[in-house]
Amino acid sequence: MSWLRRLPVRLLLLLLLTIEIYPLIWLLLSSFKEDAEFSLRPLWALPAGLHWQNYVEAWTTGNIGLYFLNSVLTVFPALALILALSVPAGFALEVMRWRGRNLVLLLFLAGIMVPLQILLLPLFTIYFHLDLIDTRWALIITYTGFGLPLTVFLMAGYFKAIPRELLEAAILDGAGLVQLFLRVAVPLVSNGLVTVALVQFFFLWNDLLFSLTFISNDQLRTIQTGLLNFTGQYGQVAWGPTFAAVSLAVFPTLLLYLLLNQRVIKGLTAGALKG
């Protein structure tokens, strides 16, 4: 029977789904527990009620609201810069024909291979002399610099997948270079653009290394370093607010991915196909 042949695959998928989903469900349920429940009841027990005070305490006393805002004010400007620079660069490297473009693309590819830890000390020294330590600009510049190589490389692949006949037809119809880029090429790679934007967003939003290195002022901490400080502040006492704080950091990004899931799947396959 066909269903018997599919049964092992379905069981494997169910197991993988449980491994992925259960920690998120456990995290969400734990965020509603009172502190006494963590010591008096099993860890897998359901909360006795919805203790919303955990979220209020995490947002106010734990300063998660401030850390969340700091992340928004650093991640989105950096993401805008990455896209504003990488999309034209990918177009120029793959659609336009000029001497040395393959070498430039290889240099961007080499930038992906540079370990982040090697550059921490040089970057810290440069930012220290420029008085950029404990400023959002230190993170924005760093995020942009490290986000460009991968984004340019991916965007070049998406532009490569555009059928050249479409671009040639637009040129024959009188489209200039700017019109060709903005009105023809960019709309055709919109799914790829959403994909690389989401990939970079998750990388920047979850960054701990750079924020921990360049930011020591508590008023400028991003949400990841804020969570580190939050757990250090409460230790073993207030697990409920701690789980609430982690939920505030995790679930908005998960919701964003679920909303853009279909476009991401299309974007992941678009660059692999030659039109």
Image: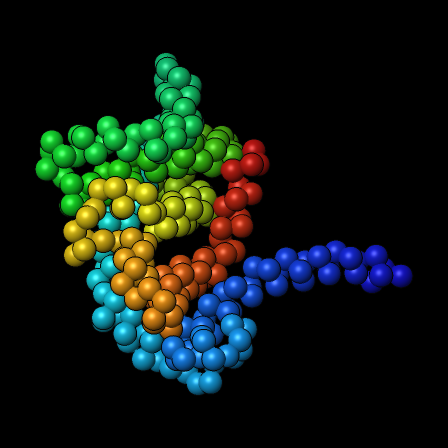
Residue displayed at 83% across by 57% down:
5
Q: Nearer the viewer, residue 166 or 132?
A: 132
Residue displayed at 42% across by 21% down:
106
Q: Is residue 33 above or below residue 19?
A: below
Q: Quadrant of the C terminus?
A: top right
Using residue 214 as the reference point, say whether residue 147 is left or right of it. Answer: right
Which quarter of the figure has residue 68?
Answer: bottom left
Residue displayed at 14% across by 34% down:
128
- Residue 216, horizontal then vertical, whole percent: 19, 48
Which quarter of the figure has residue 124?
Answer: top left
- Residue 238, horizontal then vertical, whole percent: 34, 71
Q: Is residue 142 above or below residue 225?
A: above
Residue 244 shows in the view: no
Q: Quadrant of the N terminus?
A: bottom right
Residue displayed at 26% across by 70% down:
59
- Residue 214, horizontal then vertical, whole percent: 22, 42
Residue 126 shows in the view: yes
